[in-house]
Image (cartoon, rainbow, N blue to C red):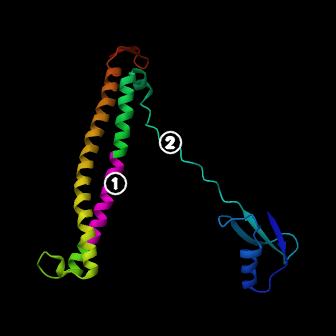
Amino acid sequence: MRIQTKPPRTALYLLAVASCGGAPSGGSAQERIIVEPSPAPPGHLEIVVDPPPRATPPAPIEPPAPEESARAKMSEEEADRHAELWWSVLRCRKLLIGFSVATAVGAALVFPAEFTQCPGDEMSLDRCSPGGRVMVVAGYPLLVIGGLAMLSSGIVLGVTKGELRRLEQRVARRESRSLRWDPATARFVF
């Protein structure tokens, strides 16, 4: 939509026209308003209102397809197990990242509070300032629980990735052990 107006006298007038009267009545706050000089007669301003770009919904994540040679030899049960393990690896990776962030936030709260807000050697909250108490009370659970959960999710991720790798290797090994013709060497290979 293009609207042509006469040149404004002040920047404040231009701002008022662009924000109040320059936009069409059906416009929303999401639309961009561009004020640029018109290529036609000099001195005229052109207000262009572009609709906001439409966000497309993200495509669903699908597990990576095994190689064609492995896919041909993978049974339906193995394909289901492969997809299940792949989703499990994805979930464990997300959990590991989330718990790592929680541990980092807990450490960022606890360590500065212990060194600056809580002087003294005794282990009580009475020695802390009010801000230090809040930081210690919120930081220690995040640090301890996040650290333990990060450790356990990391172990589960390693075990699950190992199972997935062994399944893929087993399928590839089974395919490679079969007797087949190799055109490069012009003979049968195992």
Which residue is label 2 attached to?
60
Given the image, on which type of amino acid does mark 1 rest?
Ile
Identify the residue at the far left of this view: 122
Residue 148 in percent (x, y) is at: 22, 55
Residue 57 among those drawn in magenta: no
Residue 159, relative to residue 174: is it above or below? below
Above or below for 146 versus 134? above
**Residue 180 against residue 159 in the figure, above or below:** above
Residue behind mark 1:
97
Query: At 41% across and 31% down in the image, what residue appears?
Result: 66
Left or right of 14 in this view: 184: left
Residue range (magenta): 92-109
Q: Residue at x 25, y 53 (%)?
A: 149
Q: Which mark is residue 53?
A: none
Number of other residues with Cα within 10 Å of mark 2, as a class: few under 14, some 14 to 19, many 20 or more: few
Along the line of sight, which residue is nearer the eye, 113 or 73? 113
